[in-house]
Image (cartoon, rainbow, N blue to C red):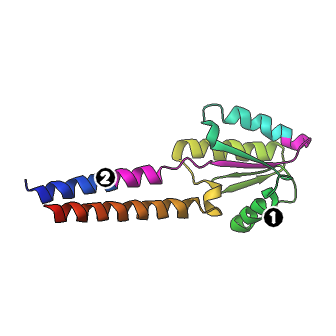
Amino acid sequence: MSRRRALLIVFASLAAVSMSALCADDAPMIVVFHEHDCPSCLEIEELLEGLTLGLPDTAVVRYEIHEPGALQLLGRLEAEYGVEALTVPVVFVGDLVVAGSGHEQEFQLRDAISRCELFGCPSPLDRVLTQQSLREDLFRGALFVAAFLLLLLWQSL
């Protein structure tokens, strides 16, 4: 096998590893907006604790609506999902939005979280935040650096 062919195989392997590492998604699949001392929020929190026992801690992210930037993020998610949540708690799971608490909301959350566990689901934050763009930019940068290094190695042969 020629040295050039070996370098190409190494380059392709590095690119594949870089792509899989950069595309690994540790973004949360459940996003919760709540308010301090909200009885409905406490009910949903208790429900979520039970439903997410086997999930990693990073699967759920919580925003208190009075935290800086929380209402803006909620507004962006509402616009992206085409809903207007008039009450808290508001829970985004994959492609579903659940507002308020009660039996219907509990059923919806159980179903949505089960489906996400079985089949996976997109992070609601990926719809509005630049995480995906950042990963793509990092991947392009890694490919550029790898191609540059490959050219340097190629010239030294």
Q: Position of residue 74 (x, y in %)?
A: 77, 59
How crowded is the residue under tag 1: few (<14 C-alpha within 10 Å), some, or many (20+)? Answer: few
Query: Which contiguous range is marked in magenta?
Result: 16-41
Amino acid type, label 1:
Glu
Image quadrant in which you'd find residue 147 = bottom left
Check disc 2 and report the residue beneath it.
Answer: 14
Check disc 1 and report the residue beneath it.
Answer: 84
Amino acid type, label 2:
Leu
Mark 2 element type: helix
* 156 relative to 48 in the view: left or right: left
Image quadrant in which you'd find residue 69 = bottom right
**Residue at 76% of width from left, 52% of height from top?**
98
Q: Position of residue 140 (x, y in %)?
A: 42, 65
**Residue at 89% of width from left, 43% of height from top?**
36
Count how many numbered circles sit on residues in the image. 2
Q: Residue furthest front?
A: 156
Q: CA distance from mark 1 to mark 2?
A: 45 Å
